[in-house]
Amino acid sequence: MGDLGPDTFWASAVAGVDCVFHLAARVHVLHETEADPETAFLRANVDATRGLAIAAAGAGVKRLIFASTVKVCGESTRPGAPFNDACEPAPQDAYAHSKRAAEEAIAASGVPYCVLRPPLIYGPGVGANFAAMMRWVQRGWWLPLGGIRNERSLVYVGNLCDALLQAATHPAALNNTFLVDDGSPVSTPELLRAVAEASGLPSRLIPLPQWFLSGALHLAGRGAEASRLTGSLAIDSRRIREQLGWRPPFDLAGGLRATTFSNG
């Protein structure tokens, strides 16, 4: 389809199609190069999605499945208080705002739809912070992260694909929105130990107090990194299990084995 934007021509893509999976987006950018990032997110994630939804409705598409993000609910949770499907949308950055606006554009278009809101997605070829974390473990580094007590929800790409297919076929998914994840949140130390086990390596974690680690990173000008390592972003995805009967086919260990082998 080329670049996504308000002028993207969707008619030929949706002609004769029963179901559309819309996964393409401009995602969160750590090192932004756009002079006007908000406009870039608007064009790719909102304008293009609106055009697709309207074209799909006009072509008689039976269902549009949209991959949104848990960040529509907010940037963080408190331990023991995960986001659930009744969360009041509270997007914080341009990416999350654009995804929420895209959800609204789909709902207003008239096309039958289902929205999934995943947390961090991992799997073969994963990059960014998740790949960096795996390299720390696989290089045998001692990591001062053993004292962190947080909760992070994840979803393996194989589980997300399975949920997307369930959303495309189950009657109860129609015109609905669901959070989706692997099942249970993990702390940063638990995740590092699981990566080490999947890689056949020992985990080397030093139980540095969380307050000390977070403070040191903030003093070093690495507050965003501190938030990613020590903060919580957890979800309660029981609704997709109860209403659609969905169960993730892969557990964390299986997803990490596939991820570490492909990235190693």
Image (spheres, grey):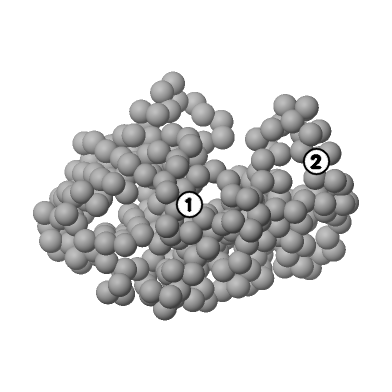
- Would you name the residue on which mark 1 appears? 70
Amino acid marked by disc 1: Val
In the rendered image, the residue lying farthest to the top is 35
Amino acid marked by disc 2: Trp
**Left or right, 242 with reference to 202:** left
Relative height, residue 197 to residue 42 (above, below) = below
Residue that appears at 56% across and 57% down: 82
Residue 221 seen by the camera: yes
Crowd around label 1: few <14 · some 14–19 · many ≥20 (10 Å): many
- Would you name the residue on which mark 2 appears? 211
Relative height, residue 40 to residue 249 (above, below) = above
Image coordinates for residue 208, horizontal then vertical, percent: 87, 47
Tell me whether circle 2 and circle 1 mark residues in contact (CB < 8 Å): no
Q: CA distance from mark 2 to mark 1?
A: 26 Å
Quadrant for residue 255, please give it.
bottom right
Relative height, residue 187 to residue 29 (above, below) = below
Residue that appears at 85% across and 46% down: 209
Name the residue nearer the viewer: 90 or 64. 90
Mark sitting earlier along the chain (2/1): 1
Secondary structure under the numbered disc 1 in the rendered image: helix
**Left or right, 263 with reference to 176:** right
Residue that appears at 31% across and 62% down: 176
Quadrant for residue 4, please give it.
top left
Image coordinates for residue 47, horizontal then vertical, percent: 27, 38
Name the residue nearer the viewer: 211 or 60. 211
Q: Give the total number of marks visible in the rendering.
A: 2
**In the image, which disc is placed on residue 210?**
none
